[in-house]
Image: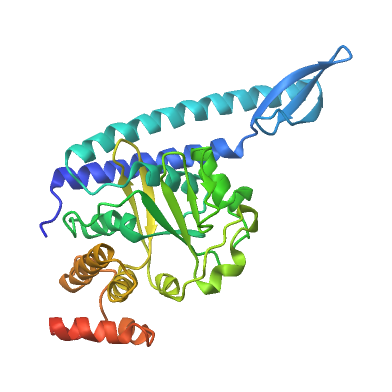
């Protein structure tokens, strides 16, 4: 597992910088009113704040020096943020292209578009975690090396863990639910009525919502999602999460907030041993798990060491899986 070259590391660092700038501007844009304009009623002009694309608006009163200042300030702020957003987005595209040319780990483009919107809405991390193969590029960037050759190639789906606890709003920040957020990216996203834990778009890209039993009560009701709470998803909540900006195939980038790689890896080992798991998925699970645990042992993930404290936290269901791996490797956790 050779480390990334200086060129790869530099491109990834630049991408993260440009992405952070874009998210900041996009959040400020989101905080502005949808629009603002003058409307003549009975011969008098009134300033209206437009709330949505349907044209719903609220009157801010008749034309006055104060309202003219308000309107001009709004227009100047909006124009400035639009230009800053456009410029930072262009830099993301340029740097993402460099990353792709340098063959760094990549995200699926549909996943990147969705995750970037969750990030703008401030839901990524507090409410949404990235599970499955889409988490692997973030772990590789954290380790400064590709951890699994070919093992970070995701299929046409994205697993998201609903991680909001009782202190988080029942809907995402600023009133955006999961489905609403995805529709901001692509209006063709709808809940799959046959598999109501899944949202998919016209291109058949699937976003699956995984819910730990402890978080079921905070899932947004308005989405009509009905995921089956799975105890094994609970294992993705503890520990120290990984957060990295990852370039996407076909352009763009997104921040990935992924579970603690140690918990992710042991859960993957458990999944790979389940009889109901398909052989193809089980093989990929096992390769990803071993690569992550090896990275922890080798010190490539220094924030995530395999200590006695970590092992002591493992539930009874995972202890035999861990013991088998540790025995095969002759590994003994450090204090």
Question: Could you say which quadrant of the image residue 271 lies in?
Answer: bottom left
Residue 166 is at least partly visible in this image:
no
The percent coordinates of residue 4 (x first, y second) are 15, 51
The residue depicted at 51 percent of the width and 30 percent of the height is: 81
The residue depicted at 76 percent of the width and 23 percent of the height is: 47
Check the image and name the residue furthest to the top.
43
The residue depicted at 14 percent of the width and 46 percent of the height is: 6
The residue depicted at 26 percent of the width and 58 percent of the height is: 142
Rendered position, 78 above or below 258:
above
Colour option used? rainbow
The percent coordinates of residue 124 (x first, y second) are 47, 54
Residue 114 is at least partly visible in this image:
yes
Question: Could you say which quadrant of the image residue 87 lies in?
Answer: top left
Foreground of the two, 307 or 293: 293
Quadrant, the C terminus: bottom left
The percent coordinates of residue 68 (x first, y second) are 72, 21
Give the side of residue 241 with respect to residue 8, left or right: right
Rendered position, 129 above or below 5:
below
Check the image and name the residue furthest to the left.
2
Rendered position, 177 above or below 281:
above
Rendered position, 38 above or below 149:
above
Foreground of the two, 305 or 252: 252
Quadrant, the N terminus: bottom left
Number of marks in picture: 0
Give the side of residue 256 with respect to residue 123, left or right: left
Check the image and name the residue furthest to the right.
42
Give the side of residue 177 with respect to residue 286, left or right: right
Question: Could you say which quadrant of the image residue 65 lies in?
Answer: top right
The percent coordinates of residue 241 (x first, y second) are 38, 65
């Amino acid at each position: 597992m050779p480390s990334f070259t200086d060129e790869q590391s530099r491109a990834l660092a630049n991408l993260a910088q440009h992405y952070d700038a874009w998210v900041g501007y996009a959040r400020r844009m989101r905080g502005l009113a949808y629009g603002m304009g003058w409307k003549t009623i009975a011969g008098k002009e009134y300033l209206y704040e437009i709330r949505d694309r349907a044209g719903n608006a609220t009157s801010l009163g008749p034309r006055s020096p104060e309202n003219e200042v308000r309107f001009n300030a709004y227009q100047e702020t909006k124009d400035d943020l639009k230009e800053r957003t456009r410029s930072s987005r262009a830099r993301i595209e340029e740097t993402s292209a460099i990353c792709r040319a340098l063959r760094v780990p990549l995200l699926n483009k549909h996943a990147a578009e969705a995750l970037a919107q969750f990030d703008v809405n401030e839901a990524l991390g507090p409410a949404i975690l990235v599970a499955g193969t889409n988490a692997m590029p973030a772990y590789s960037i954290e380790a400064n090396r590709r951890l699994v050759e070919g093992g970070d190639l995701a299929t046409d789906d994205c697993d998201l863990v609903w991680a909001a606890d009782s202190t988080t709003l029942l809907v995402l920040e600023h009133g955006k639910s999961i489905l609403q957020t995805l529709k901001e990216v692509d209006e063709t996203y709808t809940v799959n009525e046959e598999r109501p834990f899944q949202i998919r778009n016209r291109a058949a890209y699937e976003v699956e919502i995984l819910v730990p039993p402890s978080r079921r009560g905070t899932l947004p009701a308005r989405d009509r999602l009905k995921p089956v709470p799975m105890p094994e998803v609970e294992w993705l909540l503890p520990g120290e999460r990984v957060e990295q900006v990852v370039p996407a195939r076909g352009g763009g980038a997104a921040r990935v907030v992924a579970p603690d790689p140690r918990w992710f890896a042991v859960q993957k080992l458990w999944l790979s041993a389940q009889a109901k798991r398909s052989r193809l998925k089980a093989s990929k699970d096992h390769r990803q798990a071993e690569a992550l645990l090896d990275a922890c042992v080798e010190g490539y993930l220094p924030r995530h060491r395999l200590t006695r404290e970590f092992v002591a936290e493992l539930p009874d269901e995972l202890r035999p899986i861990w013991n088998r791996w540790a025995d095969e490797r002759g590994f003994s956790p450090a204090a």
